[in-house]
Image (spheres, rainbow, N blue to C red):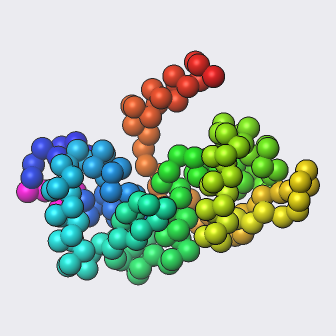
Amino acid sequence: MDAFAQRPGTWAEALLSFVQRYPGVHLREIRRRLKIPIGTLDYHLYRLGRKGLVMVRFHGGYKCWYPAISPTASGPIPETQKTLLAFLRHPLPRSLLLHLYLEGASSPGTLGQAIGTTPSNLSYFLKRLEAEGVLVRDGQGTTRRVRLVDAKQVHQVLLEYPPLAESTVDRFLRFWSELHP
């Protein structure tokens, strides 16, 4: 994608292609991946939106972008899938959702250990995911379990839309954090 950033005439095409390939990606991540100045990025996304090619949805304080017509679905992406995509584009919620998808219902303590986060951070994302209807928390105290509302929907979204490729910086940060627990 770096080649697109070198030729201003292709920025709109690069943006549209990127949003179609990775729906739910947020503005700063687009900027980081395509290396397009933020003002130029805003301008082209605005123009693509006015032409009805892309749409924005605010999700958790982020501007998340989606193609107006999904190349895989031949229509707009359903709202429930947009919500899942927005969460799957962020590392911690993605880890949480993938753990629940692969391992099934878990206790909050097990989830926190599995994804390597603090209890307060876990609580924040559990509340957000529950408020959006993605997961549900059952029970009280030591019997509390967290589970996905619709594992089939998560499965479908994971198959239909590829994850963002991990950048060199992401790999380095993960490596560094593993060296210094």
Q: In the image, is residue 74 above or below residue 170?
A: below
174 vs 26, left or right, is right
Residue 74, magenta (yes or no) = no
143 vs 40, left or right, is right
Question: Does any portion of residue 54 appear in the rendered image?
Answer: yes
Residue at image location 33% in from the left, 51% down from the top: 28
Residue 11, magenta (yes or no) = yes
Considering the whole magenta stretch, tell me its main secondary structure: helix
Farthest residue toward the right?
143
Residue at image location 37% in from the left, 63% down from the top: 63
Can you say which quadrant of the picture contains the C terminus?
Answer: top right
93 vs 140, left or right, is left
Q: In the image, is residue 42 above or below residue 31?
A: below
Can you give x and y, in whole percent of width and height, for residue 13 in the image? 19, 61
Marks counted in the figure total: 0
Q: Quadrant of residue 110 in the image?
A: top right
- Residues in magenta, as a range: 9-14
Residue at image location 67% in from the left, 66% down from the top: 130
Residue at image location 72% in from the left, 54% down from the top: 100
Question: Does any portion of residue 22 appear in the rendered image?
Answer: no
Can you give x and y, in whole percent of width and height, for residue 133 in the image? 65, 71
Can you give x and y, in whole percent of width and height, for residue 144 in the image? 86, 56
Can you give x and y, in whole percent of width and height, for residue 51 in the image? 20, 79
Q: In the image, is residue 27 above or below residue 45?
A: above
Q: Quadrant of residue 15 in the image?
A: bottom left
Farthest residue toward the top?
179
66 vs 42, left or right, is right
